[in-house]
Image (spheres, rainbow, N blue to C red):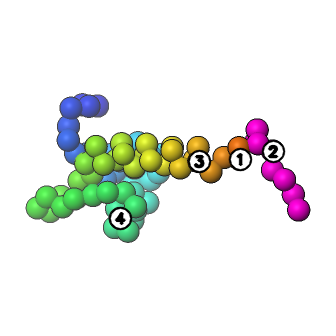
């Protein structure tokens, strides 16, 4: 896979995310996966996909309980 490309196909973005082709196109349609139209092609900017994944990782860290992983029950 050429890492120098600025954009990738929607199915390729789906493979990177571990989802199927149809799910990737649906996510692109909803705007969950950032996509741009170039003529008839729908492409995913690699930088935007990388930011999406980095932000998701930051959010996952922020959502973790700060008390060593234990959850207090009422």
Image location (x, y in percent) of residue 39: 11, 61
Name the residue beneath numbered marker 4: 31
> Is residue 48 in the magenta section?
no
Q: Residues within 10 Å of mark 4 (few under 14, many from 20)?
A: few
In the rendered image, the quadrant that contains the N terminus is: top left
Q: Residue 62: which numbered mark, if any?
A: 3
Image location (x, y in percent) of residue 41: 18, 58
Marks 2,1: beta carbons within 8 A? yes
Indicate which disc, 2 or 3, sits on the residue closer to the N terminus. 3
Q: Residue at x 81, y 50 (%)?
A: 71
Q: Residues within 10 Å of mark 2 (few under 14, many from 20)?
A: few
Q: Residue at x 24, y 31 (%)?
A: 2
Q: CA distance from mark 1 to mark 4?
A: 29 Å
Q: Residue furthest left?
A: 39
Q: Residues within 10 Å of mark 1 (few under 14, many from 20)?
A: few
Name the residue beneath numbered marker 1: 65
Q: CA distance from mark 1 to mark 3?
A: 8 Å
Between 22 and 74, the one nearer to me in the picture: 74
Q: Secondary structure at mark 1?
A: loop
Q: Which residues are magenta?
A: 67-74
In the rendered image, the quadrant that contains the C terminus is: bottom right
Indicate which disc, 4 or 3, sits on the residue closer to the N terminus. 4
Indicate which disc, 1 or 4, sits on the residue closer to the N terminus. 4
- Image: 47 above or below 21: above
Image location (x, y in percent) of residue 66: 71, 43
Q: Which is more foreground, mark 1 or mark 4?
A: 1
**Is residue 25 among what the camera can see?**
no
Name the residue beneath numbered marker 2: 70
Q: CA distance from mark 4 to mark 3?
A: 23 Å
Marks 4,2: beta carbons within 8 A? no
């Amino acid at each position: 896979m050429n890492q120098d490309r600025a954009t990738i196909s929607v199915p390729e973005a789906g493979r990177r995310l571990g989802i199927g082709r149809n799910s990737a196109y649906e996510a692109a349609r909803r705007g969950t996966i950032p996509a741009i139209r170039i003529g008839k092609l729908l492409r995913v900017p690699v930088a935007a996909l990388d930011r999406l994944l980095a932000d998701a990782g930051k959010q996952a860290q922020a959502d973790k309980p700060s008390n060593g992983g234990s959850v207090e029950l009422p």
